[in-house]
Image: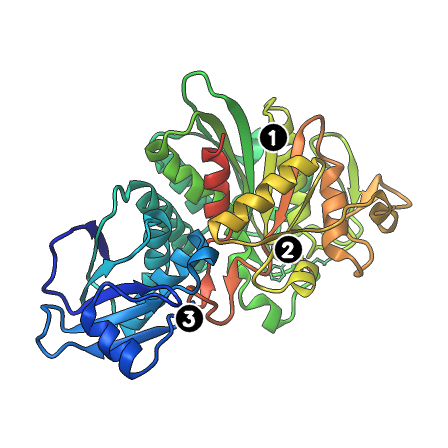
Amino acid sequence: MDITISNDAKDVDVLVISMFEGEKTSQELANEFAIGQDGFKGEKGKTYLMQTYGKIPAKKILIAGCGKREDFTENTAREVAYKAVKKLQQIYAKTAVFDFDFDYSKSVVIGAMIADYAFDKYKSEKSTRVNTIYLKNAQDLTEGKIFAKALKFTRDLANEPASYATPTKLAEIAQSLDGIETKVYDKSEISDMGAFLAVGQGSSQPPKFIHMKYTCENPKKRIALIGKGICFDSGGLDLKPPASMLTMRDDMSGAACVLGVMSALKELMPQVEVHGIIAACENMPGSNAYKPGDILKAKNGKTIEVDNTDAEGRLTLADALCYACELGVDEVIDIATLTGACVVALGTQVSGIMGNDDELIQNLINTAEKSGERFWKLPMFKEYFDSLKSDIADMKNTGSRQGGASIAGIFLKEFVKDVKWAHIDIAGTAFLEKPQGEFIKGASGAGVRTLLNHILAV
Ligand code: BES
Ligand code: MN
Ligand code: ZN
């Protein structure tokens, strides 16, 4: 789908107009039929479709309900746009003009492009798509389009089968990003990362430790983003049951998010130095697999007794966090499909967030809200560490099932030193098992919009 600014496109399949509750629309015809005859009220999220019978150049009019004007936000703009696109798809419309009585073109572009997304590269029959949207009265679509492109990049990558999106593939993608310097470490160069390497050793796919960097002159801030990059999580020797394993190609959604964010930086040109870090590997039960009872040594020297090989994400993140803390950045944010417990606690619409700095956490929660995402703070009281105590090592990698998301958080904290840190658990939000709002089934690109806006807010 292409979105362009145009004030004179008229000859289209559908003219999409906005309507606030208690107000009229910009089209007499629409007012006469929708409001006068049928009593359409313009409630938020509702739409009204009508034929125009040649009275205006567009074949149909779609009225997008916007709710009360005083309640209108960028999230309403996004909702209006994605509902309109979904409706256009349903009626096989190919061209449309969006003539809206508000100017949130960034949200409109992002909403429309999310709704237009399909992962149909492996299907012989492609999805029904809208070809062109002409946006009236808009100033600049650049930023919205960059965000939408980053989201698509992340969603495509997370939707790919694990046999495509291998650690080596992620490394190649990182190396191909425009305007990004990338260093990829092979196994032999990171022998101090005993926790990460243990997770990867049961797979025939070699692990890759990826460090991307975006720089600019006189950065105002230095940020490190870490994405969990488990390209496939079978559970390892503590093998997952089939139903739980089915979607575990999504276990690199954090990595896909970080790659998507990095892919957009050259064009967005923020005054920030951004490091993107991914410890990429597969968690497989091969003959060399790490075993329950093994003791691993992370990069900071702390030892970990393997209690469950399926709690692998935190092991890879442990070494990545140590690495990031050595960069001397101002803040570290990790994003990970980390715990089923977070899905139980918050569901599929809300990501969990915790960390060691309330201001950073609150900032990210606020930015998420404005970005069309939802983050919710989970506690990280020190007592959560009690169940991680080990008789033979500094800690175990799993403890009680109760409070599992917070326990994973307190585990990660052991590897964070002298830096502001936030941990985002996207286990529930990154990969949807059924359509949700503007998203089709599959990868949602969780975190991309929030992290990009967080970087731009500096
Ligand atoms: N990748 C999973 C977490 C996950 C679960 C992501 C559901 C997306 C959807 C993670 O590696 C895992 O297996 N966690 C275990 C931890 C347990 C062994 C302490 C879990 O949540 O069951
Ligand atoms: Mn696991
Ligand atoms: Zn995992």
Residue 122 in the image: x percent, y percent? 32, 66
Q: Can you tell which quarter of the image residue 75 is in?
A: bottom left
Dot in front, 2 or 1: 1
Q: Is residue 51 left or right of residue 89?
A: left
In this picture the colour scheme is rainbow
At numbered mark 2, what does the secondary structure look like: helix, strand or loop? loop
**Residue position marked by numbered label 1 in the rendering:** 331
Q: Looking at the rendered structure, which numbered label has been put on residue 287? A: 2
Q: How far apart are marks 1 and 3 (CA)?
A: 42 Å
Label 2 neighbour load within 10 Å: few <14, some 14-19, many 20+: few
Answer above or below: position of 258 versus 88: above
**Residue position marked by numbered label 3 in the rendering:** 43
Answer above or below: position of 169 versus 345: above
Q: Specify the amino acid type for callout 1.
A: Glu
Residue in front for this viewpoint, 5 or 451: 5
At numbered mark 1, what does the secondary structure look like: helix, strand or loop? strand
Label 1 neighbour load within 10 Å: few <14, some 14-19, many 20+: some
* Residue at (77, 50) in percent of width and height: 407
Ligand 2 quadrant assignment: bottom right
* Residue furthest bottom as drawn: 37
Q: Can you tell which quarter of the image residue 161 is in?
A: bottom left
Q: Distance between the residues labelled 2 and 3?
A: 60 Å
Residue in front for this viewpoint, 364 or 123: 364
Q: Specify the amino acid type for callout 2.
A: Ser
Residue 71 in the image: x percent, y percent? 48, 57
* Residue at (70, 38) in percent of width and height: 358
* Residue at (57, 45) in percent of width and height: 366
| Circles 2, 1 touching at the beta carbon (< 8 Å) | no
